[in-house]
Amino acid sequence: MNKLIHSLMALSLLSLFSCKGYTDLSVADFDKMLSQDATVQLVDVRTADEFAENHLPGALNIDWQGDGFIDLAKAALDPARPVLAYCRSGKRSAAASSALQKAGFTVYNLRGGFLGWTEAGKRVTKYEVETFWTDGGKPVRITLIKHGSLEVAYDGLSIQIDPVGEYGKHTDYAVEFPKADVILVTHEHKDHFEPATIDILSAEGTRLILNETSRAQIGKGEAIANGQRTELPGGIVMDAVPAYNTTPGREMFHPKGNGNGYVLTIDGLRIYIAGDTEDVPEMAGLKDIDVAFLPVNQPSLRVDKDKMPRHVAIIMDGNGRWASGRGLIRSAGHTAGVKTLKNILKTAVNLKLESLTVYAFSTENWKRPLAEVDFLMHLFSEYLQREMREMHENNVRIKFLGRTEDFAPALQKLMRDAVELMKDNTGVKFNVAADYGGQDEIVRAARKLAHRVQSGELEPEDISAELFDDALDTCGQPPVDLLIRTSGDLRVSNFLLWQAAYAEFWFTDTPWPAFTPEEFVDALVAFGKRNRRFGALN
């Protein structure tokens, strides 16, 4: 009889599991799976506002309560890989997990949710976190804090690189990060070297390793020079390598080669970290690097300000091809492309560019598969929610080109909110072409002028190129000087047909997700060498 009862209980439990379809995990088991399985996909199903405040490192945000959750998940996630889901308390993620399981995913739900995770003392972050895996299958999580400031977390160790609290956005290291096991300083500039923050992160046993000039200034720690090697906790081998010029004639960049780059070899994974990025001959000796973090160093020094374009336009092409070439789904390319856009806009701000226009979504892009379009709309919303405050702080003024009234009401409101927030800013005019086509824009401008003629406000002979220009979406901005297209295609694809009448073109085979600020500056430098004749002989 007892055997029969036990069998019935087992069948009941199996039936209950089958009905639910997904697996609930405790905080400990969830953390274990996250740490040990390189294939997992971590999904935060809370709202974008909740996600922006704090989230688990490496999570992708897809709002369970937003429109088209399953379609977005299908576009963003690989059904062949397990999904780890969480929300605030575990209730929303339970519903989301059930829906994902029915859609063909293998899903594990965090029991107790974000609250249980934080109550257990587990790490959360508001920063972007990239995860890489060692040869032995252990995760290395790198938190991108700001400019050259990073945290490398491996096997319970915390390594802080160039920690600064007050440069740019404030970072509260005492609250947001644990005490460091190792602190590395590349060079002594204030955006990389801040003694007060070093003190905050230091505990008994923390190793502080600096370039020689920083060591002389702070009066403590270990000085390391280019070419030297040391072993860090956890069996990590660190080499100090060149990152800054010693080459004669290039002294405008960190003169005298007084800074370090660092190569960390972590169980076969080789990570190169430079304080700032420079095209230096000394770096040619670096070999077999798996991951490189290269903050941009003062690109304005390479650009002749008298030969700078006033208005740069970019066709951001190649997201899907970039992803396919790496065995990833297309949405991974779009997500990576957003990171590139953030870096290029920052560079435009640093260079004090007058106008930057990017081709985000064309009138023809509606023809793409519905799941991809839905994901792009989600990504667009997420980008605005996350970035509009920082854009505002950087004095950017945003404008949207195209027939924006065709977007979902919630996205339209976000766009209006962003424009309203930045309307009085005087920095880079950042134009986002969305549901945009050059021919459509010209037709709309012609209709505006036709209505003015029809109403008697305007005579046909009064219409001029200047008046037509004022009827375009880019009213009040200079014509395009330089048009950049990534990923190898040699066409304008119905983009800014009127404004680019005398634009210089710059094409690159580099797909958009791999397009760097350095290559952007290469295009600006090339523009400065062009002889623009505008139809004249010279």
Image: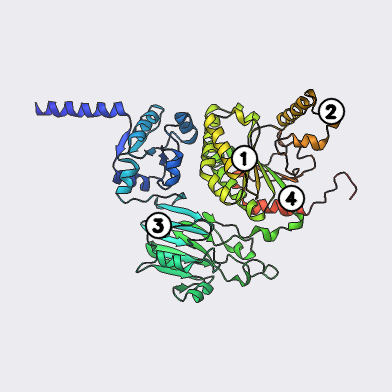
* Tag 1 secondary structure: loop
Figure check: 349 above or below 423: below
- Amino acid beneath label 1: Gly
Quick one: which residue is furthest to the right in this view? 537
Residue nearest the observer in this picture, 421 or 223 = 421
Q: Measuring from the top left, give residue 452's x and y in whole percent.
A: 77, 27
Marks 1 and 2, how far apart at CA: 45 Å
Q: Is residue 327 in view from this perspective?
A: no
Q: Secondary structure at mark 3?
A: loop
Residue 463 is drawn in which quadrant? Answer: top right
Q: Which residue is mark 4?
A: 309
Residue position marked by numbered label 1 in the rendering: 318
Three-letter residue code for mark 2? Glu
Labels 1, 4: front one: 4
Of callouts 1 and 2, the N-terminal one: 1
Element carrying mark 2? loop
Q: Residue at x 32, y 44 (%)?
A: 115
Nearer to us of marks 1 and 2 is: 2
| 77 and 56: which is toward the camera | 56
Q: Amino acid at mark 4?
A: Pro
Task: Determine the residue positioned at 35% across, 57% down.
Answer: 156
| Residue identified by numbered label 3 | 177
Residue at mark 1 to residue at mark 4: CA–CA distance: 24 Å
Q: Is residue 133 above or below residue 468?
A: below
Task: Residue 284: name its quadrant.
Answer: bottom right
**Residue under numbered circle 2:** 459
